[in-house]
Amino acid sequence: MSEVRRTDEIQGDIIHEYDGIEEADNRLPNWWLATFYIAVIFAIGYWFYYQVYESGLQPLAAYQAKIAENSNAPKEEVSAEMLNSMSADAAAVEAGKAVFVANCVACHLDKGQGNIGPNLTDAYWIHGGAATDIYKIVDQGFAAKGMPAWGPVLGAEKAKQVVAFVLTLRNTNVPGKAPEGEEWKEGGAESAPEEQTVEETDSSANEGAKAPAASDTAKLENKDEKPSSAATPDAVEAKAVN
């Protein structure tokens, strides 16, 4: 290694050279220095706020607090009329679509055509296609099928909104995963509740705690293996719905 001291027209001062590789000594750009110092100041403030004075909740603690808040919130009666009415409300459907995109796309894909979860756009539903059937699966999940309980995660209002959005997907028949479950026709009755074992129920509760992670959504598995159709995002819920 040899020390070199010369000035390159483009690189500036060359202070070292090793095996033909030259090291220049240039002043860092002001914009780079500014972002560096801002990052350092932010990190120090963050550390004092969360670690030293514990003035705010860590992300996991904030999430668990939200789950507890939603779980303890009074349960309102959700009817088919209420959900169908919301599915005709553009604002509610748009809000539900945002929830679906944020939480359900991993399993049901963007159009609800199904991926790990079932196709939400056909006429076949694993757990019933009535509005209240869909809400029940979204709210409570179905551990045996890998559907997380989204009710405690989303809260009642967002759960209803995402169901309203899923209702708009029903029977749109987007090409995707093959049909699963039983055919449901418009005006069909609500499905009889399916029983879950104690182990499944406990497991379902645990799944609900993990629900926010898209990777968990990926655990969804389709129950009745029929010709496959498709599943969608809110499909996470829709999947359960099915």
Image (cartoon, rainbow, N blue to C red):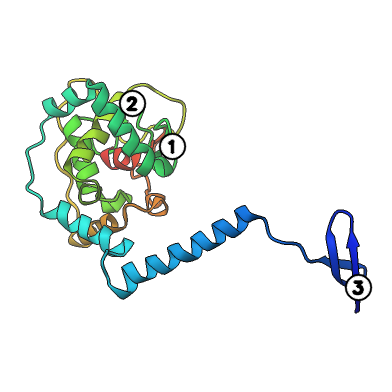
Indicate the position of residue 158 as horizontal and vertical percent values.
23, 39
- SS for dot 3: strand
- For badge 2, the amino acid type reads Leu
Q: Choose top left, top right, bottom left or bottom right for residue 223.
A: top left
For the residues bearing labels 2 and 1, Cβ distance under 8 angstroms: no
Q: Residues within 10 Å of mark 1 (few under 14, many from 20)?
A: many
Marks 2 and 1 sit apart, C-alpha to C-alpha, by 12 Å
Counting labels gives: 3
For mark 3, what is the residue? 4
Indicate the position of residue 112 as horizontal and vertical percent values.
39, 32
Sequence-wise, the earlier of marks 3 and 2 is 3
Marks 3 and 2 sit apart, C-alpha to C-alpha, by 70 Å
- For badge 1, the amino acid type reads Leu
Depicted 117 relative to depicted 202: above or below: above
For mark 1, what is the residue? 109
Depicted 27 relative to depicted 16: above or below: above
For mark 2, what is the residue? 169
